Amino acid sequence: MICGLCKYLQVFATSEGKGWGVRSVTALKKGTFICEYIGEIVTNQELYERNKERAAKKEEHTYPVLLDADWGSERILKDEEALCLDATEFGNVGRFINHRLEADRSLFVAIRCGDSNLIEIPVEVESPDHHYYHVAFFTVRDVEAMEELTWDYGIEFDDIYHPIKAFKCKCGSKYCRNKQKIQR
Ligand SMILES: C[S@@+](CC[C@H](N)C(=O)[O-])C[C@H]1O[C@@H](n2cnc3c(N)ncnc32)[C@H](O)[C@@H]1O
């Protein structure tokens, strides 16, 4: 992470209608650091307000990642305290990585039931303050050259309270949460 990007990544236009995506030009071993997810640090409340404005402008792509901070705290944070990363205006290559179902997130590690190839890991970087950490992507299996890199956004596709309607998932995975909901 300290060295920054050290793999040859390519932003490309996906053929399935997901917009831009990211792939690795070379094959990658399981456990490889890919990149950080960079964005503006805002509270959940600020993000909610921003999303309402974006929904009014009919913006299609959004780039939020919940930090669920403070990991050092045992209480549930209010929306005006909890933080997230918004990469809509400022970000790096991480914001072009698309969604695909990964694991049973209630178990957090252990059982993997999906087939995305990345996982996001919160990494504390030389800070005594538990409230801030970096989000870093690592491969969870070997990845072939030119295979699209994906991670699980943890989206609830039928969340009617979110100001921006969730996208129709085109990940193509047989485990797709969105597909299962549509079929019901
Ligand atoms: C963080 S951006 C990823 C980069 C985006 N594809 C782009 O062109 O900028 C997230 C957005 O990409 C699209 N996206 C990501 N994963 C997708 C998927 N599995 N199916 C359809 N659209 C997806 C959605 O529009 C989503 O809001």
Image: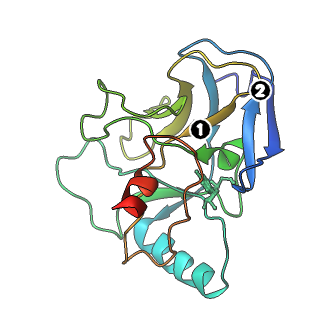
Give the residue at the far front of this rendering.
183
Q: Residues within 10 Å of mark 2 (few under 14, many from 20)?
A: some
Q: Which quadrant holds the C terminus? A: bottom left
Residue annotated with mark 2:
146
Let me know if residue 1 appears in the view.
Answer: no
- Between 9 and 112, the one lying in front of the other is 112
Residue under the image location 81 percent in, 23 percent down: 25
What percent of the width, then of the height, locates residue 112? 36, 28
* Badge 1 residue CB within 8 Å of ligand 1: yes
Q: Which residue is tagged 1?
A: 150
Q: Secondary structure at mark 1?
A: strand
Residue 180 vs residue 163: left or right?
Answer: left
**Does residue 90 lie above or below 161 as drawn?**
above
Given the image, on which type of amino acid does mark 1 rest? Thr
- Quadrant hosting residue 2: top right
Residue 12 position (above or below residue 128): below
At horizontal 46% and vertical 75% (from top left) the residue drawn is: 48
Q: Residue at x 59, y 17 (%)?
A: 32
Q: Position of residue 136 (x, y in %)?
A: 54, 33
User: Which three-letter amino acid code belongs to the residue tagged 2?
Assistant: Met
Quadrant the N terminus occupies: top right
Residue 128 as seen in the image, left or right of residue 75 = right
> 82 and 137: which one is in front?
137
Q: Is residue 170 left or right of residue 158?
A: right
Determine which quarter of the picture holds residue 26: top right
Taking the image as shown, residue 151 lies to the left or right of residue 144, namely left
Q: Secondary structure at mark 2?
A: loop
Q: Identify the colour scheme used.
A: rainbow
Reply above or below: 23 against 143. below
Expressed as whole percent of the image width and height from the top left, the position of residue 67 reads: 42, 50
